[in-house]
Amino acid sequence: MKFYKQFSYLGLLIVSVFLWQCSLTKTASNNATDGNSYYSVNDFKTILKYDTHVHLNVYDTTFIHQARADNFRLLAVNVNPAYYPPIEEQRSIAMRLLQVYPDRLAYATTFSLENWDSDDWQQKQLAYLKESFDKGAIAVKVWKNVGMELKDKNGKFVMIDNPKLDPIFDYLAKQHIPLIGHLGEPQNAWLPLEKMTIKGNQSYFSKHPEYHMYLHPEYPSYDAQIQARDNILAKHPGLQFIGAHLGSLEWSTDELAKRLDKFPNMAIDMAARISHLQLQAVTDYEKVRNFFIKYQDRIIYATDLEAGGTINAPELEKRIHDSWLRDWNFLVGDAMLQSTNFEGAFKGLKLPRAVVDKIYRTNAEKWFPGINKNK
Ligand SMILES: [Zn+2]
């Protein structure tokens, strides 16, 4: 009898422990899916993340080693400013890096605007793009020199909705290859330096007066740039388009929301414009946070960080790591933060875990379907 009683106590204990364990598992899985589960800032290195807008203009592995240390995969973007190496050279750097680090890297190609007026421009550039896709490129970048630099033989600015670009966009849409568009500039570019809202913009435009549109009133206006971009999205609804730098609508989540509502095949990367969202969070924290939550399927984490120039390896590692960590603290944490770009404090958005996963990982995989194809 005594033995039987002991046995049943033991049985009861085992059953209770089992039930308690079950309830723990259940709570954990509920939390992972109910939108009220959060990462801590210390989880930074534990989850795989993507930075879909970086420039690797030299064959240097520092950037990729830092990506590995911080658990990032990279999309290296070829682009053709006059002060970058030629696009063919950027492509061969990307290809060499891709061979060594297929698990950390993908790259986006671009096309040249040279000989724009010649009859075989389209044919030549389409051939270059196709060759790039054969060499592993998974997306195409178009830059602000369309709209701000390139003029046709009549001296007229060529805008992004120029019909000569249609065959390229049609081809990309048909092949499901995404187009990354850096078109126009932040609205600050149309203001005098002292009126710009972000110190980083003041510093960039004081070094690049050629893009400081306030100094060039004869150039197309800010609205004309945005309109031309909207025109191609309306004309090519099948084109998967990623508006780089918050689609040059960095100053207003309302304006961004309008485009995202109107163009379902448009997403945005936040490269080099996160401080504009932080500035809006100073005065309207809830609005910025709700924007991220409402458009959680359309926002992709990216920085515009760059390898190249004269910076040494330890400095570059620090610059990259610090930038990534600062952004993570803003998106994931809830501490009061400050930016070197403006006066005033703002609170970390503490986005739900499911939103963080999309912004840092699954949106990159969805909007750049080939991003892991060379892995
Ligand atoms: Zn860039």
Image: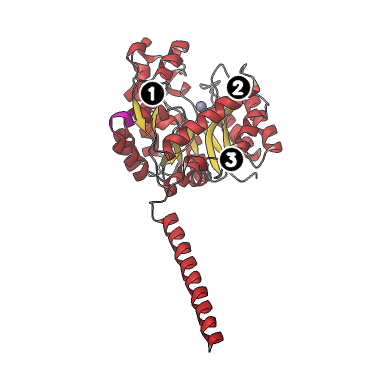
The residue under label 3 is: 71
The residue under label 1 is: 186
Label 3, label 2: how many angstroms apart (C-alpha)? 19 Å
Residue for point 54% across, 25% down: 119
Residue for point 50% across, 79% down: 9
Q: Position of residue 215 (x, y in %)?
A: 37, 10
Res 135 → quadrant:
top right
| First reached walking from the N terminus: tag 1 or tag 3 | 3
Residue 100 within the magenta-colored segment of the rendering: no
Q: Which quarter of the image is occupied by the C terminus?
A: top right
| Above or below, comparing residue 242 to residue 218 in the picture | below
Looking at the rendered structure, which numbered label has been put on residue 315? 2
Disc number lying in front (1 or 3): 3
Marks 3 and 2 close (CB-CB < 8 Å): no
Classified by dominant secondary structure, the portion drawn in magenta counts as helix
Circle 1: residue type: Pro
User: In the rendered structure, which segment of residues is drawn in magenta?
Assistant: 280-284
On screen, residue 103 versus residue 110, left or right, reads right
Label 2, label 1: how many angstroms apart (C-alpha)? 28 Å
Circle 3: residue type: Asn
| First reached walking from the N terminus: tag 2 or tag 1 | 1
